[in-house]
Image (cartoon, rainbow, N blue to C red):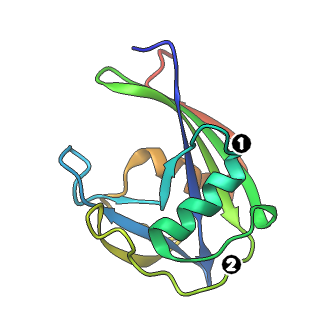
Amino acid sequence: MTDRHIVDVHILLVRAGEVLLSKRRSADEFDGRWHLPAGKLEAGESATAATAREAMEEVGVVVEPADLRHIHTAHVVSPHREARIGLFFEAVTWSGEPVNREPDKCYELAWFPLTALPQNLIEYPAAGIRAYFTGATYSQRGWPS
């Protein structure tokens, strides 16, 4: 384990009771599994600016940082991965229709009812989606109980 953490930002785009998910294209165990649009915080960038940037880069929607509502933070460690802090934001408003702008990293985008999420949803983003309902502002994975 490293002594530093990656900071991930995730965006929940919710409309008519459905959330937008992306099917990952990767060379690891997460290939073909569903995830929220997400990315890494870059140096000199605020978390909300990073989330708005990732929304545009990954799914082509415009989100103003002021229109993001923090809903969850996850602290995740795993034996063979870099430790990370995940920040989850709901886009209160956005403009544009989502499209797959990163086909090299994503097989497809799809809307799923919040009450009927896919079986192969990665657990890390699932924590942020659950927080949308429960109001749980923090979770952790991989840490001893």
Q: Residue at x 62, y 81 (%)?
A: 15
Q: Where the N terminus falls, by quadrant?
A: top left
Query: How far across and how far down the image is residue 12, in percent?
Result: 59, 64
Q: Secondary structure at mark 2?
A: loop
Q: Nearer the viewer, residue 95 or 129?
A: 95
Residue type at the position of mark 1 = Thr
Q: Quadrant of residue 111?
A: bottom left
Q: Nearer the viewer, residue 39 or 119?
A: 39
Q: Position of residue 116 (x, y in %)?
A: 45, 71
Q: Is residue 4 above or below residue 135?
A: above
- Spatial CA distance of label 2 from label 1 is 23 Å
Compare residues 143 and 110 and report the one nearer the observer: 110
Quarter of image, res 66: bottom right
Question: What amino acid is labelled 2 in the image?
Answer: Trp
Q: Are marks 2 and 1 in contact (CB under 8 Å)?
A: no
Q: Residue at x 64, y 62 (%)?
A: 52
Residue 44 falls left or right of residue 69: left
Is residue 118 at all visible to an observer of this figure?
A: no
- Residue 143 visible here: yes
| Tag shown at residue 124 | none
Mark 2 or mark 1, whichever is nearer to me:
2
Tell me the residue that label 2 is attached to.
Answer: 94
Left or right: residue 119 versus residue 5 is left
41 displayed left or right of 122: right
Residue lying furthest front in this view?
A: 44
Left/right placement of residue 35 relative to residue 68 reads left
Q: Which mark is residue 137?
A: 1
Q: Position of residue 80 (x, y in %)?
A: 28, 23
The local crowd at label 2, few if under 14, some if 14 to 19, many if 20 or more residues have their Cα within 10 Å, is some
Q: Residue at x 62, y 56 (%)?
A: 51
